[in-house]
């Protein structure tokens, strides 16, 4: 387990090249790809997520840790596919139509990837129909909508309606977040979940995907 602990430690420090070397070492030593992913990479990212929630680390540290994790995951992808290991769930995420802010969305994506979820990032200024199509095409369990402006937050209601119209409302959870969003607004538009920060969003998404399996 020493090498897996070291992967976790180096990832937390954002040392991407070192993480890559250690993942290669772990593969040589005969650890399974799933073991390296769960007990090395995701373990380290989980600690970063908890520290971020407690204000012990900040956005720059999260970003470098996520970069290190992604480099490790890239090395494992062929082995995970070979072993038939599936992601913990699929999420499509985007900032709603008319809104070009993406820092919050990007953090949520990183935290969700840190939970082992596959995230389809649709970017910013995303049409309600685009969310729906992405969820259908990628067989997503969750649609995640972000907004920073009070003028764009009502588009989230259009997303909920578009999901209902497409007949997939019973299969897809809708999560909403962003500075102007509240639990009351989430309830009002008929979304499933509002979370106040990236760590809470990732934990909720993982819970939804686990329940759907």
Image (cartoon, rainbow, N blue to C red):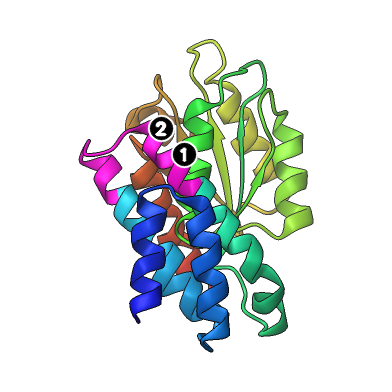
Q: Residue furthest top?
A: 151
Determine the image quadrant of residue 57: top left
Left or right: where 127 falls relative to 20: right
Magenta span includes 206? no
Question: Residue 60 bears which disc, if any?
Answer: 2
Residue found at x 48% / y 47%: 66
Magenta span includes 53? yes
Question: Residue 63 bears which disc, if any?
Answer: 1
* Residue in front for this viewpoint, 187 or 115: 115
Q: Could you classify mark 2 by the number of other residues whose Cα lies within 10 Å: few (under 14), some (14-19), or many (20 or more)? A: few
Q: Is residue 111 above or below residue 95?
A: below
Percent position of residue 8, x then y: 37, 63
State whether residue 16 appears in this view. yes
Determine the image quadrant of residue 158: top right
Q: Is residue 155 above or below residue 19?
A: above
Helix, strand or loop for disc 2: helix
Tell whether label 1 touches label 2 (CB within 8 Å). yes
Percent position of residue 174, x then y: 53, 45
Residue found at x 20% / y 41%: 54
Percent position of residue 49, x then y: 33, 49
Which contiguous range is marked in magenta? 50-66
């Amino acid at each position: 387990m020493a090498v897996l602990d070291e992967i976790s430690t180096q990832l937390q420090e954002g040392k991407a090249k070192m993480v890559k070397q250690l993942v290669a070492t772990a593969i040589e030593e005969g650890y399974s790809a799933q073991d390296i992913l769960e007990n090395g990479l995701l373990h380290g990212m989980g600690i970063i997520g908890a520290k971020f929630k407690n204000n012990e680390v900040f956005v720059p540290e999260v970003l470098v840790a996520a970069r290190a994790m992604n480099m490790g995951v890239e090395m494992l992808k062929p082995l995970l596919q070979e072993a038939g290991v599936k992601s913990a769930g699929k999420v499509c995420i985007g900032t709603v139509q008319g809104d070009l802010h993406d820092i919050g969305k990007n953090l949520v994506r990183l935290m969700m990837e840190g939970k082992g979820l596959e995230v389809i990032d649709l970017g910013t200024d995303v049409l309600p129909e685009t969310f729906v199509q992405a969820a259908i095409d990628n067989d997503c369990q969750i649609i995640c909508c972000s907004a920073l402006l009070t003028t764009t937050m009502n588009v989230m209601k259009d997303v909920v309606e578009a999901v209902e119209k497409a007949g997939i409302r019973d299969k897809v959870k809708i999560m909403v977040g962003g500075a102007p969003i509240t639990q009351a607004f989430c309830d009002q538009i008929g979304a499933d979940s509002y979370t106040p920060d990236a760590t809470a969003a990732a934990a909720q998404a993982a819970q939804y995907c686990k329940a759907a399996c």
